Each structure stands twice: as C-alpha cells, then as structure tokens.
Image (cartoon, grey):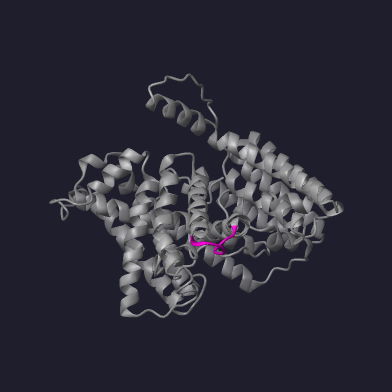
Amino acid sequence: MLFNSLEFLIFLPLCFILYWFVVNRSLKLQNVFILVASYVFYGWWDYRFLSLIALSTVVDYFIGDLLSKQDSTSSRKRLLLASLFVNLGVLGFFKYYNFFVDSWIKAWSELGIEMQGSTLNIILPVGISFYTFQTLSYTIDIYRKKLEPSNSLVNFAAYVAFFPQLVAGPIERATNLLPQFSRKRNFTFEQGKSGLYLIIWGLFKKVVIADNCAFFVNQIFNNHTAYSAGELWIGALLFAFQIYGDFSGYSDIAIGTARLFGFDLMTNFKFPYFSKNIGDFWRRWHISLSTWFRDYVYIPLGGSKGSVWKQVRNVCIIFIVSGFWHGANWTFIVWGAFHALLFIPLLLIKRNRSDVNTTRISLLDVGRIFITFVLVTIGWIYFRADSLTIANEYIMSLVGSDLFEARLFIKTNKNLLLFAISLFSILCMLLFEIRAYVKARAEVQLNMLSGVFILLCIFLMGAFKDPSQFIYFQF
C-alpha cells in the first residue's frame, strides 16, 4: 500500500479511529490491532510475502529468548550465527541470487570460458532489507547484553511489522521502538498536529517534488545519448532532488504517521544537501542505515582505531557494503566505492568528524556545501543508471560545447510547466529547510498558514496520475 494512494487515504483515518476510540482500553489490544493493521498494510501488495516477515519474527523472538538464558559464550555465538544465517540467507536469496549467478558467468566469459547457469524469476519482497536489519539489531543487542528480550510475541511482532516504517524505514533499533509497545500511549493534540504536518510535508516532497522531477529524469537517463551536456546536468540535479524528496518524504510520512499512534521514530534525514563535506553528508543522509552499519559492522571491524591501513580498509568495506545493500547491481557497489574515495582523504587528515552539529555558515562554507553537493550529484548518476557503461557515458558527456543547451525543458508547454513546478517546489523546500537548519532543528516545522500553503501546492501541483512507488521500495 502506497502512502500516496487512495487506499492509504482511507486506511489511515480508519486505523486511527479504531485505535483511539475502539481498542484504546487495553494496551495489549492496541498492539494486536497494530500488528493486524501492519500485516494488512504489507499484504495489500502481496500477501504471500507475509510468511517471510512471520519467519523472521518467530526465529528472532525465540533466539532472543534463548540468548538471555545462555551463559556459555560458544552457545550464545551459535545462536547469534543461527539468526544471521536465517535472516541474511533469506535476504541473500531473494535479493542477490541472480546477481551472483550472472556475475559468475560473466567473469568466466571474460576469460573465454563459457559457463552455463540458470537464474530464477525471483520477486524481490518490498522492504525486506529494512525489516531484516531491524530484527538483526534485536538479536545482536541481546547478544551484546544491551537489551533484554521481549516477553511478548505480539509486541515483538508488532515492532518488526510496524506499518509506518515497515517497507522503507527508518530502520528502528529494538532499543528505541520495542519498549514503546510496552508503555501506555495517550493521544495529545500537539503530537497529533506535529504528525499531521509531517505527513503533509512528506507528501509535498513526494508528489510535488519527486514525482514531477521524475518526468524529466526518466526521459534523460533512459536515453542519455540524445541530450546535450546541459540537459544531462539538469537531469542529474533533478534526480538528486527526486531521490531526496522521495526518500525523505517517505521518512517524514512514516514518522508523522507513527506520531498519530503515539510512537516516536528516529530522525532519518537532517538536511543532507547542506553538508560541508562527505562525512557530514553521511551524518545527515539515511541516518538509520549509516548508524546501523557504524554500530554493527564498522566499529566491530575496528572503526577508526588501529593503523591507517586498517582504518582505510574499514571505510572501504563499510561504504561498499552499504552500496551493495541498496541493490544487486554493480552500479550500487561503484556508488559506494565512490563515496569511500571521497571520505578517505577526510579520514587521513582527521577531518572526518569536523562540522559535527554546526549550523553557522560562512562564505567559505557556502563553497564547501556547493562542492559537496556537486560531488554527491555525480555519485547519484551511478545510483540511477541501469549499468556502469551508461553511468560512465553519462558522466563523460557532462562536459561539452553544448553545455548551455537545454531544449527539452522548453520543448512543449507541458515540459515548461512541469519544469517550472519542479524548480518552484525545490525552492520552497530549500527555503523551509534553510529556516529549520539555521534554528538547529532536526525537521521542518509547519504552522497553520504554511501547512495550508503546502496543501494547496500538493493539490495544485502534485502528480497524482498513476501514483508512483517510492524509490526505496526496491531496496
């Protein structure tokens, strides 16, 4: 079920009314209701894959319980390995099986040896990477003795399947979200208003910014050789705002929806395009994933301790694995490696932790923000392209004598109107975010006047024909 669909427009108010006015007398009943609603929400796409969520839930619930009862280090390690094997095994099969088979065949063919192999027509379950990492955080934290296991299968199942953030995050840690299912929840007007404004803001970023930008992005990336250098640059820039509007828009709607039901989810974006370097960017972009890799992969590898070689190795591993998490394509791996190459110089000169929690912007900082944004945008080309060949050709074509030609955007009245809408909505978003950034806020805060303005923009400029899927659903 899409957040920007008519079904969700009916589903959300109905769940809200039942949750607060029908099952509100019992916390257990509320949790059961959330679990059922979450399974309906996910099953609306394809009910068959509910079995995968159920499998992950049951396996990790009982492994977590067994971990708490074991004192033997070897037994605890075997239990943790069992959790890793089941969760990563299911994820690896559905997401990476065909990738490894194809890569194996192509590798041998480069050596002149023809290998035979068969791929499968595998449907990638929506959100599998998100809820897999969420359940893994539960067993790993119990193994590390940072978390007590849940004593309620219903509460744990509701935590795993919690519908606002089930299919595209934020990736919630059990230490943050799971205890909220054991506490009595009371609805407050302020929390409800804040949640509603976040939903409106997220819809604006999705249907006005992302979906209108997608009209041009799809044309340009699907036939990049037909466009000038200027149009290719604009296509790359529009994709940078498309993916930000799409993904951060989803996170805003998820966080806002959770607040309507009395839950607090972690902030997933902190105005990443105002970053002053790549290190700063990754502290602001997809925070739930970057901190997950930091805590469960990077630090166990040694983090920033040890020799320079080990630090560089750890950085390369974490960025490449992060790229591979996004999809079974070499473009994502190169995208991750590209960011590793940008990050390593900061590590070597010990500037990777600079600009932490700073909002003051000097003239020099404006230049640094611009350079960082351009580098991130170039990286997005690998993220968006269907193959490395296309991505490399696209980047090589960014420089040419036709740099100032951009006929596509004025070719028809429709193109001109959509381009104007895209630019206007991006400008509005940046103005709201600059205000929040200067005030050191983690999110844009609307009031009644600005909320009405954003709603008007959604209804007047939103792309509602054939509601598009969120980009991160494929991951």
Quadrant hosting residue 424: bottom left
Q: Main secondary structure of the magenta part?
A: loop
**Quadrant in which the N terminus is drawn:** top right
Is 205 magenta? The answer is no
Residue for point 42% across, 19% down: 114
Which one is nearer the viewer's eye here, 387 or 205? Answer: 387
User: How many labels were placed on the picture?
Assistant: 0
Q: In this view, does 53 lie to the left or right of 433?
A: right
Q: Position of residue 120 (x, y in %)?
A: 54, 25
Which one is nearer the viewer's eye here, 279 or 313? Answer: 313
Is 307 magenta? The answer is yes
Q: In this view, does 159 lie to the left or right of 26?
A: left
Most distant residue in the left direction? 401
Q: Where is residue 197 in the image (x, y as percent from the top left)?
A: 53, 67
Q: Where is residue 139 in the image (x, y as percent from the top left)?
A: 73, 52
Magenta stretch? 302-308
Residue 18 visible, this angle: yes
Residue for point 43% across, 50% down: 337
Residue for point 32% across, 38% down: 389
Q: Position of residue 6 (x, y in %)?
A: 52, 48
| Residue 87 sits above or below residue 104 on the image | below
Residue 462 visible, this angle: no
| Residue 435 sits above or below residue 239 on the image | below
